[in-house]
Image: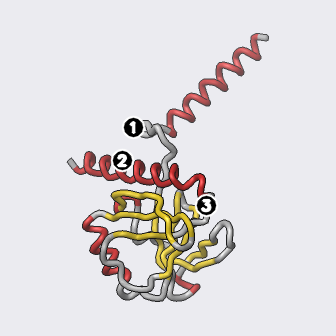
Amino acid sequence: MRLFRLLSVTLLGLLALAFAGCNSTSKKDYPVSVARFLIEADSPAGGVVARLPRSGVAITVEPKSKFTEYDIENCEVVDNEFGKSLAFSFTPAATRDLFRTTVPAQGKRIVTTVNGIPLGARLIEAPLTQGYFVTYVEAPESELAELAKNITKTSKDARKELENKQK
């Protein structure tokens, strides 16, 4: 019985230490949803494969994100010809970068990932000039509103934390 108590206390202590290391300085009251955007690679040799979850479409993308959670001001659900989609509004600086990135990338696709999981892809038909990016994602429509809300919260908190670190 004494050995059992000792093991229980030790196990609880180890669990407390493990979970303490996982917490950041600010607790989130929502699931963190980090959105990133990857551009289709010029050749398979220079990229990594992103596979969409429902369709199984595989797209070779550049390994480094072009746009991250720090570039997003807002994410919301919109209706379009394909059904419900996610619409991302970018910061002013990211809007300029989005234009500069999409001019030479016409004909390629932008892959949207959330927490590292590819969820959608959109063909770049023309340069994106308004800092507004709409993409269909392969996720249940019933989950999109919550996902958009969590992406917005994650992005706002990330930008705020970055601003605080830079002070």
Circle 3 Cα neighbour tier, 10 Å, few/some/many (<14 / 14–19 / ≥20): some
Q: Are marks 2 and 1 in contact (CB under 8 Å)?
A: yes
Q: Which mark is residue 95?
A: none
Q: Residue furthest left?
A: 167
Query: What residue did someone put label 2 on?
Result: 157
Please tell me which residue is depicted at 35% across the width and 78% down the height of the picture: 128
Q: Is residue 132 above or below residue 99?
A: above
User: What residue is pinned by disc 3?
Assistant: 139
Residue type indicated by callout 1: Ser
Residue at screen point 20% across, 47% down = 167
Work out whether residue 4 or residue 103 is closer to the camera in this orientation and state it. 103
Secondary structure beneath label 1: loop
**Gap between marks 1 and 3 measured at Cα:** 28 Å
Q: CA–CA distance between discs 3 and 2?
A: 24 Å
Quadrant assignment, res 4 = top right
User: Is 18 drawn above or below residue 105 in the view shown?
Assistant: above
Q: In which image quadrant can residue 120 be found? A: bottom right
Mark 1 — residue?
26
Please tell me in which quadrant of the rendered image residue 26 appears.
top left
Amino acid type, label 3: Ala
| Residue drawn at 54 percent across, 88 percent down | 43
